[in-house]
Image (cartoon, rainbow, N blue to C red):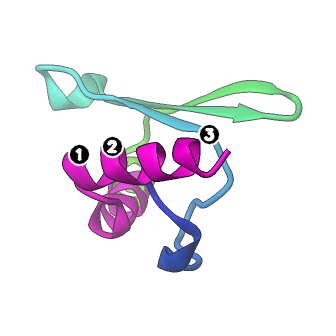
Amino acid sequence: MITFRAGAFPGAGQPVTYLQADVPQLDTVELDSTHGLEFIDSEMQLRKYQAHLGAAESVALALGASRDFIHSLVSDL
């Protein structure tokens, strides 16, 4: 989970699925855009999305902290 405290980071607000295969040449990024699904598999673009997802992971809460945060939101309802 990424809270608003993390601020902006590359790729925020865009649904992205990174499909990683056993063979790196088969890796694919799936983007859900307003005009439908897009699939990206060029090496340069894959590196870009690896960096975006790495940035998101670096500001995401750990599993336990995410659970505690969700529990605190629910208890405030």
According to the picture, the residue beneath numbered tag 3 turns out to be 15
Query: x%, y% of residue 40?
Result: 52, 35
First in sequence, mark 1 or 3: give its number.
3
Give the residues in magenta: 49-77
Q: Amino acid at mark 2?
A: Arg
Name the residue at 14% across, 22% down: 23
Which residue is at 62% across, 39% downward? Answer: 15
Q: Determine whether 19 is above or below 71 in the image.
A: above
The residue at the point 40 percent across, 61 percent down is 56
How busy is the neighbourhood of tag 1: few (under 14 within 10 Å), some, or many (20 plus)? few
Q: CA distance from mark 2 to mark 3?
A: 22 Å
Residue at image coords 33%, 43%: 67
- Label annotation for residue 67: 2
- The reply, left or right, for residue 33 in relation to residue 64 is right
**Image quarter of the C terminus:** top right
| On screen, residue 19 above or below 9 | above
Is there CB contact under 8 Å for labels 2 and 3? Answer: no
Quarter of the image for residue 47 reads bottom left
